Amino acid sequence: MSAVSDAPRHSLADKLNHLFQVVVPSGRGPYGNEEVAQKITEAGVSISGSYIWLLRKGQRDNPTLRHIEGLAKFFGVPPAYFFDDDVTDQVDRQLELVHAMRDSRVRNLALRAEGLSAASLDALLALVHEVRKMNELPPKGGDSEGEG
């Protein structure tokens, strides 16, 4: 493999910004840089809000292992999230599910589907796929492959 194909698909800044967007405390807006820095520092890893801002802007892209571990612990992801795109993809799928399940209507739909036959679940998935298309939304999860 060439060095180009080994390069991460997303930068450290992209991955960090994604975590700020999807790991949001219930009932409020996203965390701020200073808030994250304070919590990480309280956990024993000194970091500033301005340094986190630099990481998020891509103006710094080589944090110490301690900073990576502090950020990973705060956001509840493995440190490899920031370096291994396969780990990033796996964790992002899990975060997407957690984010979707915060909506009580999505939870109710999932809970009511439990126990249906495989054929009924396939029909329900096909219906959801069509409704997403009518709403001009992209396929989600296994929509395009019929996975469940």
Image (cartoon, rainbow, N blue to C red):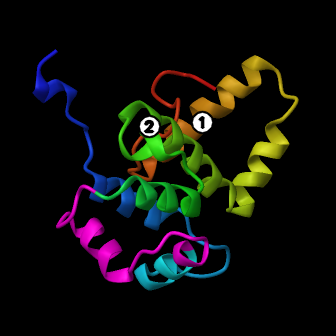
What's the amino acid at mark 1? Leu
Query: In the image, residue 54 lies at what x, y percent?
Result: 25, 72
The quadrant the N terminus occupies is: top left
> Tag 1: Cα neighbours inside 10 Å, few (<14), some, or many (≥20)?
few
Q: Residue at x 41, y 79 (%)?
A: 33
Report helix, strand or loop for mark 2: helix
Residue 31 visible within the image? no
- Image coordinates of residue 112 in percent, x first then y, are 84, 43
Of residues 44 and 4, the one nearer the viewer is: 44
Q: Report crowding for label 2: few under 14, some 14 to 19, many 20 or more residues within 10 A (C-alpha).
A: few
In the image: residue 58, left or right of residue 104: left
Label 1 sits on residue: 127
Image position of 73 with respect to 85: above or below: below
Q: Quadrant of the C terminus?
A: top right
Judge left or right: residue 104 versus residue 111. Answer: left
Note whether 31 is above or below 81 in the view shown: below
Q: Which mark is residue 2?
A: none
| Pointer 1 or 2: first along the chain | 2
Q: Is residue 16 above or below residue 97?
A: below
What segment is highlighted magenta in the picture? Answer: 40-62
Q: Report the residue marked by disc 2.
A: 89
Q: Is residue 58 magenta?
A: yes
Labels in figure, total: 2
Residue 76 in picture, x, y percent from top left: 60, 55
Three-letter code for the amino acid on which mark 2 is drawn: Asp
At a point 57% along the width and 70% down the height, the residue shown is 24
Query: Where in the figure is residue 85, as x and y percent of width and height?
Result: 36, 35
Residue at left offset 47%, top offset 78%: 37
Q: Secondary structure at mark 1?
A: helix
- Of badges 1 and 2, the one in the foreground is 2
Q: Nearer the viewer, residue 64 or 141?
A: 64
What's the residue at 35%, 72% (across, down)? 52
